[in-house]
Amino acid sequence: MCAFVSVGEGLRSAWMAHMRRGDFESAWRISDSVLAPRAGYRCDHLPQDEQWLWDGRPLEGKRVMLRCFHGLGDTIQFIRYAKLLAVLARAVTLVAQPELVPLVRTMNSGFNPLFRCRGVAAVGDVEVKLVELPHVFRTTFATIPCEIPYFHVNPKQFAQNALLNVGLVWKSGVWDKRRSVPFELVRRLGAIRGVNWYILQRGDALGEWDGGFGVNSGSDDVLEAARVIAGLDLLISVDSMPAHLDGALGVPTWTLLHSDPDWRWMLGRSESPSYATMRLFRQARAGDWQSVITRVRKALCARIAANNDNRGDDRLTVVNTSAT
């Protein structure tokens, strides 16, 4: 949320600990202490994600350039704050990743998304990183913007039968391989009846899918991917962009987390304060994805049974529920 430029590891760890506990105000006080020394100092010699833009100045009535320097999932999660900024500021120009612009345009917003994330000259009175807005607004656990959905797309139409339409993503980006689940574990979910599986995995990991279950339904077009996700009954995903997109669309999401996840997922919670329709499945021990998949299997079987009961259809069965 707020950059940790030139701060010691102890201060960084303290910020993380506060955020994970939900004590946001204590974290903002640390962020305030980071802002103070910025005035008058250049930072263009630092890596881009460590450069600062905002120096703590009030944004009321200003023309604000809002930049997205981080991952697609970060932009999807924090873009909700841009609507708050549009009310506060005189004008807001959002410089977003090009692949997200069509999606952002589905928001009922008061800002103008541009097509490039980098190389856009500053305009207006002040620049701010998108991920700094929770600090700008002094967000507390109770005031996280939770209007869901905030993207509005036409859902893709899937098979209208008694089966659940479930999407699946098992591998995240390369920067933190701990977030990915081995496909040999994920494959066990395909033995559960009562599900139409839709494989949303992208990138090289899609080559791990052997076609034994499910249909390849992913897309590199984010707006098309959003339409697919919006048509699902459920998405099961690791900590990656599709989980954020699903949560922002208000579709039920089961997010699989390793034992030491990012601060945004907090600690010991089975739900996310950022996404009302999200359920979190956490590793109890580092690297133990097997127990996570076992819990997901049980939860999915229960969901299928409830679905069958609601439809009054006793023809569907669940198999291999005891496998690990």
Image: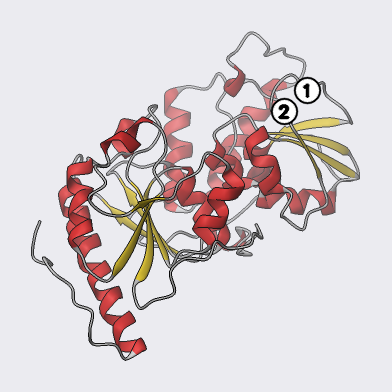
Residue type (three-letter) at the residue carrying disc 1: Val
Q: Residues within 10 Å of mark 1 (few under 14, many from 20)?
A: few
Question: Which residue is more in the foreground, 10 or 208?
Answer: 208
Taking the view exactly as shown, the residue that stands out farthest to the top is 45
* Rendering quarter of residue 46: top right
> Which label belongs to residue 116?
2
Residue 10 image offset from top left, x and y in percent: 42, 28
> Which label belongs to residue 292?
none
The answer to whether 298 appears left or right of 202 in the picture is: left
Number of marks in picture: 2
Please report contact status of discs 2 and 1: CB closer than 8 Å, yes or no.
yes
Residue type (three-letter) at the residue carrying disc 2: Arg
Secondary-structure class at tag 2: loop
Secondary-structure class at tag 1: loop
The residue depicted at 22 percent of the width and 54 percent of the height is 292
Question: Where is the N terminus found, in terms of image quarters?
Answer: top right
The residue depicted at 66 percent of the width and 60 percent of the height is 152
The residue depicted at 11 percent of the width and 65 percent of the height is 320
Question: Which residue is more in the foreground, 307 or 77?
Answer: 307
* Rendering quarter of residue 38: top right
Q: Residues within 10 Å of mark 2 (few under 14, many from 20)?
A: some
* Mark 1, residue position: 120
Name the mark nearer the viewer: 2 or 1. Answer: 2
Question: Where is the C terminus found, in terms of image quarters?
Answer: bottom left
Q: Is residue 19 visible?
A: no
Taking the view exactly as shown, the residue that stands out farthest to the bottom is 312
Residue 313 image offset from top left, x and y in percent: 29, 88
The answer to whether 62 appears left or right of 128 in the picture is: right
* Rendering quarter of residue 176: top left
Residue 40 image offset from top left, x and y in percent: 77, 15
The answer to whether 314 appears left or right of 310 in the picture is: left
Question: Which residue is more in the foreground, 160 or 291?
Answer: 160
